[in-house]
Amino acid sequence: MISITDLLTPMTRDQIRTTMVAALETAGVPASKWRKGGTLSTLLTYTAAQLAGFSTLMTQAVSSGYLEKATGGWLKLLAFYVYGVTVPSATFATGFVTLVNGSGFIYTFAPGEAIFLDPVTNKTYSNTTAISLGALATQSGIGVQCTTSGAAGSAPPNEVTGFVTAMNGVTVTNPSSIVGLDAPDDDAIRQLCLDKLGTLSVRGVRNAYSYAVDVAVNPVSGAPVNINRKSISRSSHTGTVTIVVAAPSGVPDPNDVQGVRNSIEVGVPGLSPPFSGARPDCVTVVVSGATPVPYFAPVIVWCSAPDGTTAADLQPIFEAAVLDYIENYPIGGVTTDAGQGLWGSGVDACVRQGAPAGVVVYAVEGPNDLALAAGQVALDDTTTIVRLVTPGSS
């Protein structure tokens, strides 16, 4: 009997060649004695190589029938044709900037008319909310969105400081991170398929709401919502389900929140296969954006590194590790015996785990605990500093 493991394990070229040689020997053909590099031996090796490629293709095809085994494009086909799931694309990084006008000019821009620049990555960001900046005035909370999709459009605090659209006498900065998401990986696609099963229930199970959030689109831009976290109330015995959502940077775009509401109520127009919403009759669903709580803790990393590696080389690596940790931290935090919130020990651990090969982290100073209540989300306002030390020094 052939096991499922055998079906999902491709044969290598050498395994196939060995099998072919054994079969020829059984038939009386002295294939094992053929001269290496000779015509017949080379032909046998070539044939085995071709069959190995076919074996790999066949195992991928067999794996594509199983949610836990399918990968890559095969998994996307399985998601679409079996589970009725269209895998979302990458999102556009969103966040907020602050403008300070040191001149006597007045600047007004409709959404999409002002373009800002991250001079480190050369990524550009357009305004998603109107700008009305008076002379010698400050305007904060201006929504921005990267002009290219994916996590590459993310920017840590205070890095978006340049202009493409001229504004003489004005400075710009992003007080908190601007973050986007890459397209879902295989694990996320599998969870999306499982959540889709929840939409088949007429009782409005939590997975149905989760799926509605994951496939929602921004009603203004038509792009996937830049939302990576959600909190869904566990009981609807009162007839009301409360859902709180957050963007990777913390506060979601109001239009993204509206997109989630639309998805839950009526589904997503044009989605193939069709999705007609998650809210059952006699239930009220309240959707809101998470309330941000700035996390100001400094992160000072004491470490040693291979010769030639500078603190400046390591700073963005550790900074990215902290950002990734906070941008994925659950809404409302994690509950322990000490309370509910974001814990400094977790920040310490993510820094150590993010150390590149050859870098030894001796201590992480600064991360403290941040209390979070239900509906609140940590906002990354950390400052990362790297201090290089010589091993064995005191």
Image (cartoon, rainbow, N blue to C red):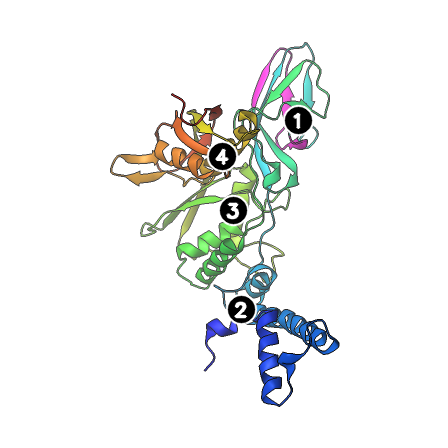
**Vertical placement of 231 versus 250: above or below?**
below
Q: Which residues are magenta?
A: 121-140
**Residue ID at (36%, 31%):** 344
Tell me the element at label 3. helix
**Residue carrying label 1:** 119
Report crowding for label 2: few under 14, some 14 to 19, many 20 or more residues within 10 A (C-alpha).
Answer: many
Report crowding for label 4: few under 14, some 14 to 19, many 20 or more residues within 10 A (C-alpha).
Answer: many
| Mark 3 or 2, closer to the camera | 2
What is the x, y in percent for residue 64?
Answer: 55, 68
**Residue carrying label 3:** 260
For this view, does 169 lie left or right of residue 358?
right
The quadrant in which residue 179 appears is top right
**Residue carrying label 4:** 323
> What's under tag 2, amino acid-wise?
Ser
Tell me the element at label 1. loop
Point out the image quarter for the C terminus: top left
> What's under tag 1, amino acid-wise?
Pro
